[in-house]
Image (spheres, rainbow, N blue to C red):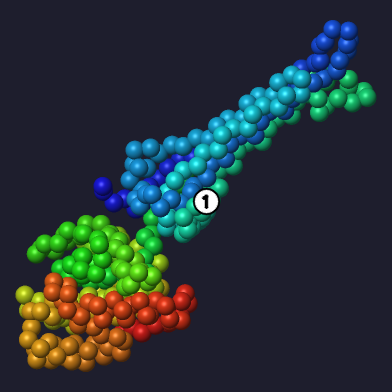
C-alpha cells in the first residue's frame, strides 16, 4: 500500500431540522391550540484516531464526508430525530488544519482520541414555543440552521521513539530489519526507501520502543531535492535520533563530510529537529579490520569534534546492535528522554 502522509478533505455537518406548525385537532376538543414540535439537531463530524490504519491513502479516493440532517418536527409536539454523527477514522499521529485559514484544529496522538471538526446545525422551533395570551394560534416556526462546512488538511506525523537519519545507502533500512520485525526494501543502490517504515524493537518481554526509518537526506534537500526532506517531519515527534554513517564508503567519500551534509540540511529545515538528542552510529563495521575501524572511528570523532555517544555496528552481521538497542532503551527510560530535556548530540 502506498504511503500517503497528506490529504485534503471536505466535511459537512448536518443541517438542523425545521420546526413544525401544527394545531391539536381531536374530537370534542375544539381549539386545541398549537402542538408543533421542534426539529432535530444536525449531526456533528468528528475525526477519530485509529490504530487500524497507518496511512491517509483512503482519503485519495473519498474526499467528502457528510453527517446526517436532523428530521423536521411533527405534530403532537413530537421532535424530529437528531442527525447521525459522522466519525472519520484517521491514523494515530494525524494533525488537522483548516485548509483555508491554516488554523490547527487538533493533534490526534492517542488511539481513540477524537476532535470535533464540524458542528451540526441547531434545530428549528415548532409553533408551540410561540403561543401566548395574545397569540393563541401562532403560525410561525423557525427553520433549522445549516451545519458547518470546512475543508481540512490532514497531515500525518509518525509516532516513533527513535528516528534513523543519514544519507542514502547508509544502512538505515538494513538496521531496522536487523533490530525489529519490519521488512523494508534493501538493495545496493540509493533511494530504495521511498516512504517511512516503522519497526517495534523488543528489548525484552516488557520493554520495547518504536523506530522510524525515512528516505535518505541528500544535499539540497531543504530546497526539495531528493525524498528525505519530505519525510523529515516524521522525525519531529521522536525523542532520539540515530545518525547512521557509512564508515567504509565504496566510493572513498569522507564520512565526516557525510555527517556535516546531513547536519546542514536538518538545521536548515528545522532548528527544533537539529536540537534533538542525536547519537552517531558507524555502520558497515564488518568491511574493516579492527585496527582500521578503530582508526576511522577516532579520526571521525576528532574531525567532527563529536561529544555525544558513538556506536559501531554492522547491520548485516548484527555486530554491536544489541549494545545499541539496550543503550537506546535505557536512554528512553531516563529523564534525559523526557520532552523538553536536552540530550547528548554533536
**Residue at the top extreme, as displayed:** 27
Element type where label 1 sits in the image: strand
**Residue at the right extreme, as displayed:** 133
Q: Which quadrant of the view contains residue 306?
A: bottom left
Q: How many marks?
A: 1
| Residue 281 position in % (x across, y down) | 23, 79
Looking at the figure, which quarter contains the C terminus? bottom left
Q: Is residue 205 left or right of residue 219?
A: right
| Residue 117 position in % (x across, y down) | 53, 46
Local packing at callout 1 (Cα closer than 10 Å; few below 14, some 14-19, many 20+) is: many
State whether residue 149 appears in this view: no
Q: Is residue 82 left or right of residue 113?
A: right
Q: Is residue 290 above or below residue 20?
A: below
Residue at figure coordinates x 13%, y 71% from the top left = 316
| Residue 118 position in % (x across, y down) | 55, 43
Q: Nearer the viewer, residue 1 or 269?
A: 1
State whether residue 105 appears in this view: yes
Q: Is residue 13 above or below residue 257?
A: above
Residue pointed to by mark 1: 114
Residue at figure coordinates x 46%, y 76% from the top left = 338
Q: Which quadrant of the view contains residue 146?
A: top right
Q: Nearer the viewer, residue 242 or 166?
A: 242
Q: Is residue 122 left or right of residue 94?
A: right
Residue at figure coordinates x 31%, y 50% from the top left = 4
Residue at figure coordinates x 17%, y 75% from the top left = 318
Q: Is residue 266 above or below residue 104?
A: below
| Residue 315 position in % (x across, y down) | 17, 73
Amino acid at each position: 500500500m502506498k504511503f500517503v502522509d497528506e490529504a485534503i478533505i471536505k466535511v459537512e455537518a448536518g443541517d438542523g431540522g425545521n420546526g413544525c406548525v401544527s394545531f391539536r385537532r381531536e374530537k370534542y376538543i375544539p381549539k386545541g391550540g398549537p402542538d408543533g414540535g421542534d426539529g432535530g439537531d444536525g449531526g456533528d463530524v468528528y475525526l477519530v484516531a485509529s490504530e487500524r490504519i497507518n496511512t491517509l491513502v483512503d482519503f485519495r479516493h473519498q474526499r467528502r464526508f457528510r453527517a446526517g440532517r436532523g428530521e423536521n418536527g411533527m405534530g403532537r409536539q413530537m421532535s424530529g430525530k437528531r442527525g447521525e454523527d459522522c466519525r472519520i477514522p484517521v491514523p494515530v499521529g494525524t494533525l488537522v488544519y483548516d485548509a483555508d485559514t491554516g488554523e490547527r484544529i487538533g493533534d490526534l496522538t492517542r488511539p481513540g482520541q477524537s476532535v470535533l471538526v464540524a458542528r451540526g446545525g441547531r434545530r428549528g422551533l415548532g409553533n408551540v414555543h410561540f403561543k401566548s395570551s395574545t397569540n393563541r394560534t401562532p403560525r410561525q416556526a423557525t427553520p433549522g440552521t445549516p451545519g458547518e462546512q470546512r475543508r481540512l488538511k490532514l497531515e500525518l506525523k509518525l509516532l516513533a521513539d527513535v528516528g534513523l537519519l543519514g544519507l542514502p545507502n547508509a544502512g538505515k533500512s538494513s538496521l531496522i530489519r536487523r533490530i525489529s520485525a519490519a521488512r523494508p526494501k534493501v538493495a545496493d543502490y540509493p533511494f530504495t526507501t521511498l516512504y517511512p517504515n516503522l519497526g517495534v524493537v523488543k528489548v525484552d518481554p516488557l520493554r520495547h520502543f518504536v523506530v522510524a526509518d525515512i528516505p535518505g537526506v541528500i544535499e539540497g534537500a531543504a530546497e526539495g531535492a531528493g525524498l528525505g526532506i519530505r519525510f523529515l517531519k516524521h522525525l519531529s515527534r521522536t525523542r532520539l535520533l540515530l545518525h547512521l554513517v557509512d564508515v567504509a564508503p565504496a566510493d572513498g567519500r569522507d564520512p565526516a563530510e557525510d555527517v556535516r551534509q546531513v547536519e546542514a540540511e536538518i538545521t536548515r529545515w528545522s532548528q527544533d529537529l537539529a536540537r534533538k538528542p542525536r547519537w552517531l552510529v558507524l555502520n558497515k563495521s564488518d568491511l574493516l579490520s579492527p585496527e582500521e575501524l578503530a582508526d576511522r572511528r577516532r579520526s571521525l570523532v576528532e574531525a567532527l569534534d563529536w561529544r555525544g555517544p558513538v556506536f559501531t555496528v554492522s547491520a548485516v552481521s548484527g555486530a554491536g546492535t544489541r549494545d545499541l538497542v539496550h543503550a537506546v532503551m535505557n536512554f528512553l527510560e531516563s529523564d534525559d528522554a523526557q520532552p523538553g530535556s536536552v540530550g547528548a548530540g554533536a
